[in-house]
Image (cartoon, grey):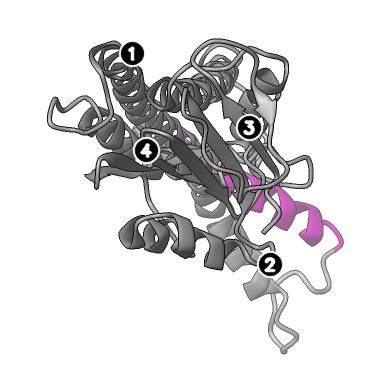
Amino acid sequence: MTPLFAYDIPTEGTPRAVSDLDHPLPEDGYRWVHCDFTHPGVEDWLFANLPERAAEILSLPETRPRSLGHEGGVIVILRGLNLDPEADDPEDMVALRLWAGPRLVVSVRRRMVRSAQEVGAEVASGDAPRSPQMLLVRLAANFTDRIEHHGVAIEDKVDDLEDLLFADARQPERRDLPELRTASIRLHRFLTPQAVALQQLTDPRMPLIDAEAREDLSELADRAQRAVEEMNAIRERLAALADHVDMKQNTRLARNSYALSIVAAIFLPMSFVTGLFGVNVAGMPGVDWAPAFAVLTLASIGLGAVVYIVLRAMRLF
Protein backbone atom coordinates (compact mmCIF):
# COMPACT_ATOMS: atom_id res chain seq x y z
CA MET A 1 0.00 0.00 0.00
CA THR A 2 1.36 3.40 -1.02
CA PRO A 3 -0.01 6.29 1.07
CA LEU A 4 -0.49 9.82 -0.14
CA PHE A 5 2.02 10.76 2.54
CA ALA A 6 3.28 9.43 5.87
CA TYR A 7 5.32 11.13 8.59
CA ASP A 8 6.93 10.09 11.83
CA ILE A 9 6.38 13.04 14.18
CA PRO A 10 8.57 13.05 17.31
CA THR A 11 7.61 14.84 20.51
CA GLU A 12 10.70 16.98 20.02
CA GLY A 13 12.47 17.42 16.72
CA THR A 14 11.72 17.50 13.02
CA PRO A 15 9.08 15.29 11.36
CA ARG A 16 10.46 12.66 9.00
CA ALA A 17 8.79 11.37 5.86
CA VAL A 18 8.19 7.61 5.93
CA SER A 19 8.61 5.57 2.76
CA ASP A 20 8.34 2.10 4.33
CA LEU A 21 5.21 1.57 6.43
CA ASP A 22 6.61 -1.74 7.72
CA HIS A 23 9.22 0.25 9.63
CA PRO A 24 8.45 0.15 13.41
CA LEU A 25 6.41 2.99 14.86
CA PRO A 26 8.43 5.70 16.61
CA GLU A 27 9.02 5.18 20.33
CA ASP A 28 8.87 8.92 21.03
CA GLY A 29 6.00 10.48 19.11
CA TYR A 30 3.57 9.06 16.58
CA ARG A 31 3.12 8.26 12.89
CA TRP A 32 0.54 9.89 10.63
CA VAL A 33 -0.47 7.96 7.53
CA HIS A 34 -2.79 9.63 5.01
CA CYS A 35 -4.14 7.46 2.21
CA ASP A 36 -6.74 7.28 -0.55
CA PHE A 37 -9.13 4.34 -0.16
CA THR A 38 -9.49 4.01 -3.94
CA HIS A 39 -5.77 3.06 -4.26
CA PRO A 40 -4.87 -0.62 -4.39
CA GLY A 41 -4.05 -2.38 -1.13
CA VAL A 42 -5.41 0.30 1.21
CA GLU A 43 -8.30 -1.78 2.56
CA ASP A 44 -6.07 -4.79 3.28
CA TRP A 45 -3.55 -2.57 5.04
CA LEU A 46 -6.25 -1.00 7.22
CA PHE A 47 -7.53 -4.38 8.42
CA ALA A 48 -3.96 -5.58 9.02
CA ASN A 49 -2.87 -2.56 11.09
CA LEU A 50 -5.97 -1.14 12.81
CA PRO A 51 -8.58 -2.55 15.18
CA GLU A 52 -11.23 -4.35 13.17
CA ARG A 53 -14.04 -1.92 14.00
CA ALA A 54 -11.86 1.07 13.11
CA ALA A 55 -10.93 -0.53 9.78
CA GLU A 56 -14.59 -1.25 9.03
CA ILE A 57 -15.69 2.34 9.72
CA LEU A 58 -12.81 3.85 7.75
CA SER A 59 -13.78 1.60 4.82
CA LEU A 60 -17.45 2.60 4.66
CA PRO A 61 -18.48 4.03 1.26
CA GLU A 62 -21.00 6.49 2.77
CA THR A 63 -20.62 8.20 6.13
CA ARG A 64 -21.87 11.00 8.31
CA PRO A 65 -19.90 12.95 10.95
CA ARG A 66 -19.44 10.96 14.15
CA SER A 67 -16.87 10.16 16.84
CA LEU A 68 -16.41 7.27 19.27
CA GLY A 69 -13.75 5.81 21.50
CA HIS A 70 -12.39 2.34 20.74
CA GLU A 71 -9.51 0.31 22.17
CA GLY A 72 -7.60 3.25 23.60
CA GLY A 73 -8.06 5.45 20.54
CA VAL A 74 -10.77 7.45 18.79
CA ILE A 75 -12.57 6.97 15.50
CA VAL A 76 -13.64 10.29 13.98
CA ILE A 77 -15.39 11.14 10.73
CA LEU A 78 -15.42 14.78 9.69
CA ARG A 79 -17.01 16.50 6.73
CA GLY A 80 -15.53 19.43 4.85
CA LEU A 81 -16.20 21.57 1.79
CA ASN A 82 -15.38 20.06 -1.58
CA LEU A 83 -12.69 22.46 -2.78
CA ASP A 84 -11.51 20.31 -5.67
CA PRO A 85 -11.11 22.69 -8.67
CA GLU A 86 -13.12 20.24 -10.79
CA ALA A 87 -16.04 20.19 -8.31
CA ASP A 88 -19.14 22.21 -9.18
CA ASP A 89 -20.48 22.69 -5.65
CA PRO A 90 -18.38 23.19 -2.50
CA GLU A 91 -21.46 22.05 -0.53
CA ASP A 92 -21.07 18.57 -2.06
CA MET A 93 -19.06 17.80 1.07
CA VAL A 94 -16.16 15.36 1.31
CA ALA A 95 -15.37 13.08 4.26
CA LEU A 96 -12.15 12.47 6.15
CA ARG A 97 -12.13 9.26 8.21
CA LEU A 98 -9.63 9.09 11.07
CA TRP A 99 -8.28 6.55 13.51
CA ALA A 100 -6.15 8.18 16.20
CA GLY A 101 -4.25 6.00 18.63
CA PRO A 102 -1.39 6.80 21.03
CA ARG A 103 1.29 6.09 18.40
CA LEU A 104 -0.54 5.90 15.07
CA VAL A 105 -2.95 8.21 13.25
CA VAL A 106 -4.50 7.01 9.99
CA SER A 107 -6.65 9.28 7.84
CA VAL A 108 -8.54 7.98 4.81
CA ARG A 109 -10.26 9.83 2.00
CA ARG A 110 -12.21 8.84 -1.11
CA ARG A 111 -12.10 12.28 -2.70
CA MET A 112 -9.57 15.04 -2.26
CA VAL A 113 -9.74 16.69 1.19
CA ARG A 114 -7.97 20.03 1.05
CA SER A 115 -7.74 20.36 4.82
CA ALA A 116 -5.67 17.17 5.14
CA GLN A 117 -3.43 18.29 2.29
CA GLU A 118 -2.79 21.64 3.96
CA VAL A 119 -2.03 20.16 7.37
CA GLY A 120 0.22 17.62 5.65
CA ALA A 121 2.13 20.48 4.01
CA GLU A 122 2.52 22.15 7.41
CA VAL A 123 3.95 18.93 8.85
CA ALA A 124 6.36 18.66 5.90
CA SER A 125 7.58 22.19 6.62
CA GLY A 126 8.27 21.26 10.25
CA ASP A 127 5.13 22.74 11.82
CA ALA A 128 3.65 19.52 13.21
CA PRO A 129 1.27 18.90 16.14
CA ARG A 130 3.25 17.08 18.82
CA SER A 131 0.54 14.56 19.73
CA PRO A 132 -2.18 12.60 17.91
CA GLN A 133 -4.94 14.49 19.74
CA MET A 134 -3.50 17.86 18.73
CA LEU A 135 -3.30 16.68 15.11
CA LEU A 136 -7.00 15.88 15.39
CA VAL A 137 -7.61 19.37 16.78
CA ARG A 138 -5.72 21.01 13.92
CA LEU A 139 -7.62 19.06 11.28
CA ALA A 140 -10.96 19.87 12.91
CA ALA A 141 -9.97 23.54 13.16
CA ASN A 142 -9.10 23.63 9.45
CA PHE A 143 -12.48 22.12 8.56
CA THR A 144 -14.30 24.57 10.82
CA ASP A 145 -12.43 27.62 9.50
CA ARG A 146 -13.35 26.77 5.91
CA ILE A 147 -16.99 26.16 6.76
CA GLU A 148 -17.22 29.46 8.66
CA HIS A 149 -15.69 31.41 5.76
CA HIS A 150 -18.06 29.75 3.31
CA GLY A 151 -21.01 30.49 5.62
CA VAL A 152 -20.00 34.16 5.71
CA ALA A 153 -19.85 34.19 1.90
CA ILE A 154 -23.38 32.76 1.70
CA GLU A 155 -24.60 35.30 4.26
CA ASP A 156 -23.12 38.13 2.18
CA LYS A 157 -24.98 36.86 -0.89
CA VAL A 158 -28.22 36.78 1.10
CA ASP A 159 -27.57 40.39 2.20
CA ASP A 160 -27.12 41.37 -1.45
CA LEU A 161 -30.40 39.66 -2.38
CA GLU A 162 -32.24 41.49 0.41
CA ASP A 163 -30.83 44.82 -0.76
CA LEU A 164 -31.86 44.00 -4.32
CA LEU A 165 -35.42 43.10 -3.34
CA PHE A 166 -36.16 45.62 -0.58
CA ALA A 167 -33.89 48.60 -1.24
CA ASP A 168 -33.73 48.55 -5.06
CA ALA A 169 -37.12 46.85 -5.61
CA ARG A 170 -35.63 44.73 -8.39
CA GLN A 171 -35.95 41.01 -9.10
CA PRO A 172 -32.90 38.76 -8.47
CA GLU A 173 -31.49 36.48 -11.14
CA ARG A 174 -33.78 33.51 -11.71
CA ARG A 175 -31.40 30.91 -10.27
CA ASP A 176 -29.74 32.91 -7.44
CA LEU A 177 -32.36 32.15 -4.80
CA PRO A 178 -32.72 28.40 -5.54
CA GLU A 179 -28.93 27.95 -5.61
CA LEU A 180 -28.49 29.64 -2.22
CA ARG A 181 -31.32 27.60 -0.70
CA THR A 182 -29.76 24.38 -2.01
CA ALA A 183 -26.34 25.36 -0.65
CA SER A 184 -27.72 26.16 2.81
CA ILE A 185 -29.67 22.88 2.96
CA ARG A 186 -26.60 20.83 2.00
CA LEU A 187 -24.41 22.57 4.55
CA HIS A 188 -26.97 22.23 7.31
CA ARG A 189 -27.33 18.51 6.62
CA PHE A 190 -23.76 17.81 7.75
CA LEU A 191 -23.06 20.74 10.06
CA THR A 192 -25.47 19.52 12.74
CA PRO A 193 -23.95 16.02 13.16
CA GLN A 194 -20.46 17.52 12.88
CA ALA A 195 -21.14 19.82 15.82
CA VAL A 196 -22.42 16.80 17.76
CA ALA A 197 -19.33 14.75 16.82
CA LEU A 198 -16.97 17.48 18.02
CA GLN A 199 -18.95 17.85 21.23
CA GLN A 200 -18.70 14.09 21.85
CA LEU A 201 -14.91 14.34 21.69
CA THR A 202 -14.97 16.62 24.75
CA ASP A 203 -16.44 13.85 26.92
CA PRO A 204 -13.92 13.16 29.74
CA ARG A 205 -14.46 9.43 29.19
CA MET A 206 -13.16 9.68 25.61
CA PRO A 207 -9.76 7.95 25.40
CA LEU A 208 -6.63 9.73 24.16
CA ILE A 209 -8.09 13.25 24.43
CA ASP A 210 -6.25 15.17 27.14
CA ALA A 211 -7.34 18.36 28.92
CA GLU A 212 -5.64 20.72 26.44
CA ALA A 213 -7.16 19.01 23.41
CA ARG A 214 -10.54 18.81 25.15
CA GLU A 215 -10.54 22.57 25.71
CA ASP A 216 -9.67 23.26 22.06
CA LEU A 217 -12.28 20.79 20.82
CA SER A 218 -14.89 22.39 23.06
CA GLU A 219 -14.22 25.73 21.38
CA LEU A 220 -14.44 24.11 17.93
CA ALA A 221 -17.71 22.40 18.89
CA ASP A 222 -19.10 25.79 19.97
CA ARG A 223 -18.05 27.35 16.66
CA ALA A 224 -19.61 24.47 14.72
CA GLN A 225 -22.87 24.87 16.67
CA ARG A 226 -22.81 28.60 15.97
CA ALA A 227 -22.38 27.80 12.27
CA VAL A 228 -25.45 25.54 12.51
CA GLU A 229 -27.48 28.36 14.06
CA GLU A 230 -26.28 30.84 11.43
CA MET A 231 -27.22 28.39 8.67
CA ASN A 232 -30.68 28.02 10.23
CA ALA A 233 -31.04 31.80 10.19
CA ILE A 234 -29.90 31.92 6.55
CA ARG A 235 -32.46 29.26 5.61
CA GLU A 236 -35.22 31.25 7.31
CA ARG A 237 -34.14 34.47 5.57
CA LEU A 238 -34.08 32.71 2.20
CA ALA A 239 -37.55 31.28 2.85
CA ALA A 240 -38.78 34.81 3.66
CA LEU A 241 -37.17 36.13 0.47
CA ALA A 242 -38.82 33.36 -1.58
CA ASP A 243 -42.19 34.24 -0.01
CA HIS A 244 -41.60 37.91 -0.82
CA VAL A 245 -40.73 37.13 -4.45
CA ASP A 246 -43.86 34.95 -4.76
CA MET A 247 -45.99 37.67 -3.18
CA LYS A 248 -44.66 40.30 -5.61
CA GLN A 249 -45.32 38.03 -8.58
CA ASN A 250 -48.83 37.18 -7.37
CA THR A 251 -49.58 40.85 -6.75
CA ARG A 252 -48.40 41.77 -10.23
CA LEU A 253 -50.46 38.99 -11.80
CA ALA A 254 -53.54 40.02 -9.80
CA ARG A 255 -53.10 43.66 -10.81
CA ASN A 256 -52.74 42.74 -14.49
CA SER A 257 -55.74 40.42 -14.32
CA TYR A 258 -57.81 43.17 -12.68
CA ALA A 259 -56.84 45.67 -15.36
CA LEU A 260 -57.77 43.20 -18.10
CA SER A 261 -61.10 42.57 -16.39
CA ILE A 262 -61.91 46.30 -16.33
CA VAL A 263 -60.97 46.68 -19.99
CA ALA A 264 -63.09 43.65 -20.90
CA ALA A 265 -66.06 45.06 -18.94
CA ILE A 266 -65.83 48.37 -20.80
CA PHE A 267 -65.53 46.83 -24.25
CA LEU A 268 -68.03 44.00 -23.75
CA PRO A 269 -71.17 46.12 -24.58
CA MET A 270 -69.33 47.71 -27.46
CA SER A 271 -68.37 44.30 -28.79
CA PHE A 272 -71.99 43.18 -28.50
CA VAL A 273 -73.25 46.16 -30.53
CA THR A 274 -70.60 45.84 -33.22
CA GLY A 275 -71.21 42.12 -33.43
CA LEU A 276 -74.98 42.63 -33.71
CA PHE A 277 -74.64 45.18 -36.49
CA GLY A 278 -72.10 43.06 -38.27
CA VAL A 279 -74.67 40.34 -39.02
CA ASN A 280 -75.11 40.08 -42.77
CA VAL A 281 -78.94 39.65 -42.97
CA ALA A 282 -81.76 41.69 -44.48
CA GLY A 283 -83.43 44.41 -42.48
CA MET A 284 -80.27 45.92 -40.87
CA PRO A 285 -80.93 49.64 -40.18
CA GLY A 286 -78.77 52.23 -41.84
CA VAL A 287 -77.64 50.05 -44.74
CA ASP A 288 -78.66 52.70 -47.25
CA TRP A 289 -77.91 55.72 -45.03
CA ALA A 290 -74.41 57.23 -45.48
CA PRO A 291 -73.90 58.59 -41.89
CA ALA A 292 -74.89 55.24 -40.31
CA PHE A 293 -71.28 54.06 -39.74
CA ALA A 294 -70.27 57.28 -37.98
CA VAL A 295 -73.39 57.19 -35.82
CA LEU A 296 -72.75 53.56 -34.85
CA THR A 297 -69.12 54.33 -33.99
CA LEU A 298 -70.07 57.29 -31.80
CA ALA A 299 -72.81 55.26 -30.14
CA SER A 300 -70.33 52.48 -29.31
CA ILE A 301 -67.87 54.98 -27.83
CA GLY A 302 -70.67 56.58 -25.81
CA LEU A 303 -71.76 53.18 -24.54
CA GLY A 304 -68.20 52.45 -23.44
CA ALA A 305 -68.06 55.81 -21.63
CA VAL A 306 -71.34 55.06 -19.83
CA VAL A 307 -70.01 51.67 -18.68
CA TYR A 308 -66.81 53.35 -17.46
CA ILE A 309 -68.81 55.92 -15.46
CA VAL A 310 -71.00 53.21 -13.93
CA LEU A 311 -67.97 51.15 -12.91
CA ARG A 312 -66.35 54.21 -11.34
CA ALA A 313 -69.57 55.07 -9.53
CA MET A 314 -69.69 51.52 -8.13
CA ARG A 315 -66.01 51.94 -7.07
CA LEU A 316 -64.95 48.77 -8.82
CA PHE A 317 -61.63 50.43 -9.68
Provide the residue designation for mark 1.
216
Whether residue 252 is visible, yes or no, is no
Which mark is drawn over residue 101?
4
Quadrant in which the N terminus appears: bottom right
Say what amino acid the circle numbered 3 marks. Tyr
**Nearer-N-terminus badge (4/1):** 4
| Distance of label 4 from label 1 (alpha carbons) | 18 Å
| Label 4: element kind | loop
Q: Nearer the viewer, mark 4 or mark 1?
A: 4
Instruction: Please say if the residues under marks 3 and 2 sit with CB atoms less than 8 Å apart.
Output: no
Q: Nearer the viewer, mark 2 or mark 1?
A: 2
| Distance of label 3 from label 2 (alpha carbons) | 20 Å
**Nearer-N-terminus badge (3/1):** 3
Instruction: Please say if the residues under marks 4 and 1 sit with CB atoms less than 8 Å apart.
Output: no
Mark 4 nearby-residue class (10 Å; few <14, some 14–19, many ≥20): many
| Distance of label 3 from label 4 (alpha carbons) | 15 Å
| Distance of label 2 from label 4 (alpha carbons) | 24 Å
Q: Out of 270 and 59, give the one closest to the viewer.
A: 59
Instruction: Please say if the residues under marks 3 and 4 sit with CB atoms less than 8 Å apart.
Output: no
Q: Residue at x 71, y 24 (%)?
A: 121
| Label 2: element kind | loop
Q: Out of 234 and 165, give the one closest to the viewer.
A: 234
Provide the residue designation for mark 2.
40
In this rendering, the answer to whether 152 lies above or below 296 is above
The stretch in magenta equals 290-308
Q: Out of 23 and 305, give the one closest to the viewer.
A: 23
Provide the residue designation for mark 3.
7
Q: Residue at x 73, y 53 (%)?
A: 297
Instruction: Please say if the residues under marks 2 and 4 sit with CB atoms less than 8 Å apart.
Output: no
